[in-house]
Image: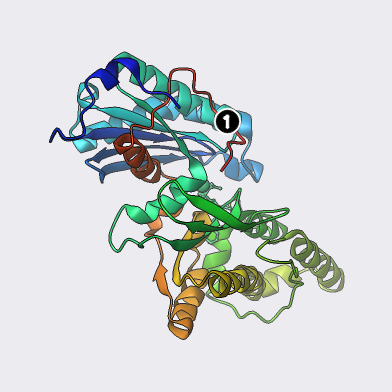
Amino acid sequence: MCGHPNFLENFDLNTKETINLLAIESSCDDTSAAVLIDGKVVANITATQLDHEKYGGVVPEVASRQHNIHIGMVVKEALDKAGIAPIDLHAVGVTQGPGLMGSLVVGVAFAKSLALGLDVPLIGVHHMHAHILAHLIDEPKPEFPFLCLTVSGGHTQLVVIRSYKEMEILGTTIDDAAGEAFDKTGKMLGLPYPAGPHIDRLAALGNPVFTFSKAQMPDFDFSFSGFKTSVLYFLQNQTQKDQDFIKNNLNDLCASIQMTIIDMLTAKLIRAVKSTGITRVAIAGGVSANRGLRNKLTELATIHGWDLFIPSFEYCTDNAAMIGINAYFKYLDQNFETQDMTADPRLAF
Ligand code: KG4
Ligand code: ZN
């Protein structure tokens, strides 16, 4: 990590100058730009790519082409909304990884060019750190240390957060992520991609009357492949007997799938609280938008006396505001990148 040579000559954190920061997120299929003034989010604009629905999943080539189309307009809209001209920016933050290479490259190349042209620092942000640090955007903010269950389309992690840059992964998935478990089982039910929000909606209309297998993983790790296979075999079996089985039981199937995933996630969270003694508990990532998960955690927090932190819906799925808050902390630490920074699909945590 190196400083920005010209900028650092004049870098003085004691100046009372307002810090205008632009953040860009393009790790998967959402193109997002945010503007933060002194760490406060004043614009957070996201273009969601709808093309993937017809392919039943994110097609990397399509995603990067769509980022190319959207990125300039999304950045302009965020700047306009914030009332900030590019020349007034003090730094540009961007998701460096992990994510899809072709998607990340669009955001990283755009951010590098902008930082170079404006002669301001470039800041690289880890996408999964950012999901967690979204909790530090608005009040109430968890004090350190806190535990976070980060559940997205690509990751499932249980993390201890000791400061904005000291994070320890206690457990992770050994196969599918929780969001994938929603999306893949939802696909078996004929639901559009991403199926998570559809399962969430339909589950509220049904009852969890079906039982699927839950992996018994050691320690704090997760596994969803056995569960996925058990849903597949169950559906194959039932539709052999009644070809309308899925149609006639859709809401109950969604409720049962959702409850099984939630049970697997919360079992590990309870274990992590017991083992660490940390009772400040947060959830993050796209799956944290799930109402069943939110309700279950609210119940658990009351039973076990946890301080529970649930992000607003705006900050659950991918967004640039979360990249911005992480970039802002890095800005205060003068933790900058040079122009040789590259997008890294497997960026280490
Ligand atoms: O964090 P995110 O936007 O992107 C990644 O970094 O992966 O997460 C996307 C994932 C998808 O798998 C989507 O189905 C899931 O989050 N998701 C949900 C809900 N909203 C989004 N899963 C369950 N219930 C929801 N309401
Ligand atoms: Zn994400």
Give coordinates of residue 305: x percent, y percent: 43, 81
The percent position of residue 172, horizontal first and vertical second, equals 64, 56
| Residue 237 % position (x, y) | 86, 70
Q: Position of residue 75 (x, y in %)?
A: 33, 30
The answer to whether residue 314 of the structure is visible from this angle is: no
Res 233 quadrant in image:
bottom right
Q: Quadrant of residue 124?
A: top left
* Front residue of 119 and 42: 119
Q: Residue furthest left?
A: 16
The residue singled out by tag 1 in the image is 344
Relative side of 133 to 127, left or right = left
Going by the numbered disc 1, the residue's amino acid type is Asp
* Horizontal arrangement in the rendering, residue 42 relative to residue 239 (left or right): left
Name the image colouring: rainbow
Q: Nearer the viewer, residue 313 or 201?
A: 313
> Tag 1, which secondary structure?
loop
Specify the quadrant that holds the N terminus. Answer: top left
Tell me if I can see residue 278 in this picture.
yes
Quadrant position of the C terminus in the picture: top right
Task: Decide if residue 172 is on the left or right side of residue 43.
Answer: right
Is disc 1 surrounded by few (<14), some (14 to 19) or many (20+) residues within 10 Å?
A: some
